């Protein structure tokens, strides 16, 4: 090897070693949307099986004291990543928060309009004049109103009651006739364990555009593309493992925190969530985001209409 080629090879090796050292030391702080639960399966499995570490990442997982704060923490530069909801992300972007979607965790809606299977509510039309419980006031007029309109019921013809987080108990006790915000993988199972059979009406089957339930968000002005690509690779590895080994991965999932995770409700929720994890977390579907943004804009949930291309970058490119 002549001197020129030796110098070039040495420079290339130095660059590769420097890049590897940087990647191995890269830390990301991820704030969840809530306490750890089966919805976070791929994150926990990626952590437990060392997929993040294999990608040169150290991921610090945090649980929020207030589930409304994670995206705001990202926008303020306090954490690197957070879990949010596609509708919430669009609302935040429309309000001017510097956020981008970096990956999808749960690729289908989980939210439902839920009733008890007791013969009193066979269709949405039967909710006319009834009480509907919600956990947090937000876009329920648009979503519930759209669903009811499919059966020619006006939003003004139902009574909305804020029951806080007591959704299941409010439905079971008869305080309300239906709940909005009950998740098809959790509240359905919680009610079943308490001896109640629930029936769910799905927004995406009743006039509401489909959307990604849970997504990862980063700061639009300050993000490390290389680190996010590595994170998404690890996440996809974990999701593939979960799909291929659902019960083995369940055992590894609960090992993360046995005292809080290893129970029947979470086990049932785990099984009901498996098919909803995004198999390609980094895959981009701009039309899905634009369609839902238009829905919110038409229903005056947002006053400006953001374009998906501006906050849903393709990090694979």
Image (cartoon, helix red, strand yellow):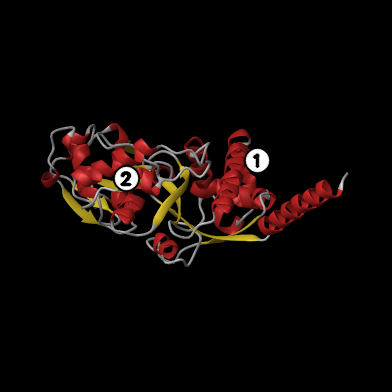
Label 2 Cα neighbours within 10 Å, binned few <14 / some 14-19 / many ≥20: some
**Can you say which quadrant of the picture contains the N terminus?**
top right
Q: CA distance from mark 2 to mark 1?
A: 41 Å
- Res. 277 mark: none
Residue matched to label 2? 307
x then y, percent, for residue 36: 51, 55
Residue for point 87% across, 46% down: 2
x then y, percent, for residue 27: 61, 61
Depth check, front residue: 143 or 219: 219
Residue for point 48% across, 58% down: 35
- Left or right of 128 on screen, residue 269: right
Can residue 201 be seen from the camera position used here?
no
Residue for point 16% across, 36% down: 149
Can residue 152 be seen from the camera position used here?
yes
Residue matched to label 1? 248
* Mark closer to the observer (2, 1): 2
Q: Secondary structure at mark 1?
A: helix
x then y, percent, for residue 219: 44, 58
Depth check, front residue: 63 or 100: 100
Depth check, front residue: 232 or 16: 16
Number of disc labels: 2
x then y, percent, for residue 274: 52, 38
Label 1 Cα neighbours within 10 Å, binned few <14 / some 14-19 / many ≥20: few
Choose the circle earlier in sequence order: 2 or 1. 1
Q: Secondary structure at mark 2?
A: loop
Residue for point 57% across, 47% down: 229
In the figure, residue 241 lies in which quadrant?
A: top right
């Amino acid at each position: 090897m002549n001197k020129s080629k030796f110098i070039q090879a040495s420079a290339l090796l130095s660059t590769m070693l420097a890049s590897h050292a940087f990647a191995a030391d890269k830390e990301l702080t991820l704030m969840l949307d809530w306490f750890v639960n089966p919805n976070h399966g791929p994150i926990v499995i990626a952590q437990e099986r060392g997929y993040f570490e294999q990608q040169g990442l150290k991921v610090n997982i945090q649980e929020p004291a207030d589930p409304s704060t994670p995206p705001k923490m990202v926008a303020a530069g306090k954490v690197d990543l957070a879990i949010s909801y596609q509708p919430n992300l669009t609302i935040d972007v429309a309000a001017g928060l510097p956020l981008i979607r970096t990956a999808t965790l749960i690729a289908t809606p989980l939210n439902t309009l839920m009733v008890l299977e007791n013969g009193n509510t066979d269709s949405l039309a039967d909710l006319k004049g009834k009480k509907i419980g919600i956990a947090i006031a937000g876009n329920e007029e648009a979503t519930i109103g759209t669903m009811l309109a499919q059966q020619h019921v006006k939003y003004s013809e139902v009574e909305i009651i804020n029951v806080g987080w007591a959704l299941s108990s409010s439905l079971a006790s008869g305080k309300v006739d239906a709940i909005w915000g009950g998740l098809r993988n959790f509240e359905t199972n919680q009610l079943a364990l308490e001896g109640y059979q629930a029936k769910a009406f799905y927004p995406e089957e009743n006039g509401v555009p489909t959307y990604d339930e849970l997504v990862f968000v980063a700061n639009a002005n300050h993000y490390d593309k290389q680190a996010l690509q590595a994170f998404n690779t690890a996440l996809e590895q974990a999701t593939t493992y979960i799909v291929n080994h659902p019960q083995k991965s369940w055992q590894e999932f609960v090992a993360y925190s046995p005292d809080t995770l290893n129970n029947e409700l979470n086990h049932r929720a785990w099984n009901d969530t498996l098919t909803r994890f995004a198999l390609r977390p980094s895959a981009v579907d701009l039309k899905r985001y634009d369609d839902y943004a238009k829905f919110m804009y038409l229903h005056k949930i947002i006053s400006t209409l953001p374009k998906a291309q501006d906050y849903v970058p393709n990090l694979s490119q």
